[in-house]
Image (cartoon, helix red, strand yellow):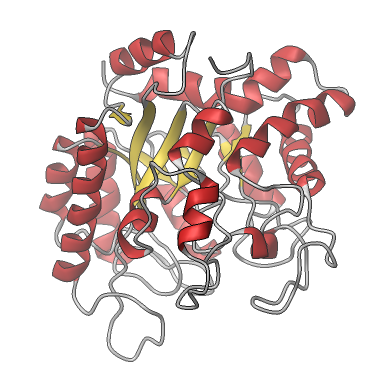
Amino acid sequence: MIENKPMIFDAHLDLAMNAMEWNRDLRCTIEELRKSEEGMTDKPDRAKGTVSLPSMREGHIGLCGATQIGRYVKRGNPMTGWNSPEQAWAQTQGQLAWYKTMEEEGEMVQIRTAIHLENHLKVWENPDNTTPIGYILSLEGADSIISVSHLEKAYNYGLRAIGPAHYGPGTYAQGTDATGGIGRKGRELIKEIERLGIILDATHLCDDSFWETMDFYHGPVWASHNNCRAFVPHNRQFSDEQITELIKREAVIGVALDAWMMVPGWVRGKSDPKSMDVSLKQMIRNIDHICQLAGTSKNAGIGSDLDGAFGKEQCPYDIDTIADLQKVPKMLFELGYSESDVQNIMSANWITFLKKNLPL
């Protein structure tokens, strides 16, 4: 049996991307995955991965936001991605097929409704090493949505959260390192997101698109994996004004563990977590900053992104696997957070949000 540990909801994991594009059988242990990748150099995180389904169970991560991601990039855009929205859509459908296969194997279970959530929480009151991991299906970046009508198709197969943008310029919004608003197509998509009751994920929206979206959108919003600009002055992070706006909307903000988002001056492929002193203490610092702005612990959570195309080479040095998120409660207690505060941050905030905003 799994030891008595607080339930963790990790709001952002790219599980299907890792399974399909990294060719990882996530039913394996971390040790098995690392051994199978020894000598491989096609990805910077080969033999350094931190996420698998057994390690999630070990860390009592019984719920997660699990992504689909298929970025469409227009000609002339130097970023990697698919050459048409249709190709990007097809990529997300392959990822969906992986999630469905994991369900058939008893490894995962999709949470589509508040009733599904309640049932899953009961199962995780006494989990063991075979208990399925629940997932909320999320789409990171909306460019794979060929037309607004495709969003309803996605809702019908269980999509419950969507981020309109990812990196760079997009069809429906502008993302990290881009500028500009959401435009006509963006407003059409956001109107449909609101009609369907899908959660809007504000993560990756550039400042212009963020504020235009907040002016236009009136439905449920969260930020699955976003840190504080107060500590790393880059547009990928939220300013205090943006965090305050999300707090007003009763959003939850998940703190991420990608090293470049945790300390200023990180250089991908060159910096080292130990020499840059990247540790879970920066995660706690971001969580505490959100709580201080809110005056409560009810808006902060975890959105680790620990499998977001990086591994041990670009995450806190005191993380070996995702199971080490269980170090966080003690660190919060030491900072003076109460037991109920810690429960809020580890999972209760996300669960409360979902109970309110998932369909019945």
Q: Residue at x 61, y 34 (%)?
A: 301
Where is residue 302, by image quadrant?
top right
Q: Residue at x 41, y 81 (%)?
A: 79
Instruction: Name the residue nearer the viewer: 266 or 178.
Output: 266
Instruction: Name the residue nearer the viewer: 10 or 128.
Output: 128
Instruction: Name the residue nearer the viewer: 318 or 36.
Output: 36
Q: Residue at x 33, y 64 (%)?
A: 21
The C terminus lies in quadrant: top left
In the image: residue 82, left or right of residue 217: left
Residue that sits furthest to the bottom in the current view: 76
Query: Looking at the picture, how far across and down is residue 25, in whole percent?
Result: 36, 50
Above/below status of 291 relative to 47: above
In the image: residue 104, left or right of residue 201: left
Query: Looking at the picture, how far across and down is residue 27, in whole percent?
Result: 38, 41
Query: Looking at the picture, how far across and down is residue 299, in whole percent?
Result: 62, 30
Residue 290 can be seen in this image? yes
